[in-house]
Image: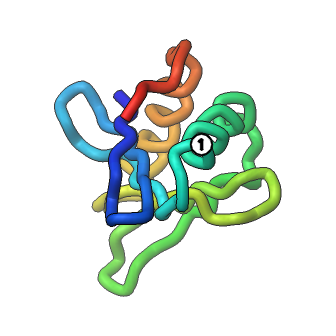
């Protein structure tokens, strides 16, 4: 499920959550709702491009991925995963979710 929410007085974010409520991805701040919707729409056709995912390991050895747009700009980051396989499963779930949404929810 994707959620778009007002984050601060002048910014918006979106998050992608599993059916059980776990957050797969939390976006960066966007200055307006139109930019959020545009980024989400652009992601729908781009998630099969390997270069938009940057896989990382944090200082404690946990895994995460960063999601970038086609121009290489950061869009969001994942939760922390205890294993590399878990992170890869998170990427797979994100791709599956974006393949199934037909419209972008309203705020």
Pinpoint residue 33: horizontal percent, then vertical percent: 51, 45
Instruction: Please rate how many residues cluster around mark 1, counting C-alpha atoms within 10 Å: few if below 14, some from 14 to 19, many from 20.
Output: few
Q: Is residue 10 visible?
A: yes
Query: In the rendered image, which quarter is residue 41 located in?
Result: top right
In this rendered view, identify the residue nearer to me: 11 or 22.
11
Circle 1 residue: 34
Q: Nearer the viewer, residue 9 or 92?
A: 9
Residue plotted at (33% across, 59% down): 7
Q: Residue 11 location, x and y as percent?
A: 44, 61
Count of picture labels:
1
Q: Nearer the viewer, residue 107 or 80?
A: 107
Judge whether 3 appears above or below 82 on screen.
above
Left or right of residue 5, residue 93 in this image: right
Q: Tell me: 48 left or right of 99.
A: right
x, y percent for residue 43:
65, 38
Height in image: 68 above or below 59?
above
In the picture, the quarter occupied by the C terminus is top left
């Amino acid at each position: 499920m994707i959620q778009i929410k007002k984050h601060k007085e002048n910014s918006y974010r979106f998050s992608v959550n599993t059916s059980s409520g776990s957050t797969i991805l939390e976006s960066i701040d966007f200055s307006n709702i139109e930019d959020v919707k545009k980024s989400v729409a652009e992601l729908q056709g781009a998630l099969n491009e390997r270069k938009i995912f940057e896989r990382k390991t944090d200082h404690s050895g946990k895994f995460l991925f960063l999601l970038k747009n086609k121009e290489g700009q950061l869009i969001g980051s994942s939760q922390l995963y205890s294993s590399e396989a878990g992170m890869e499963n998170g990427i797979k779930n994100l791709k599956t979710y974006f393949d199934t949404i037909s419209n972008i929810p309203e705020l």
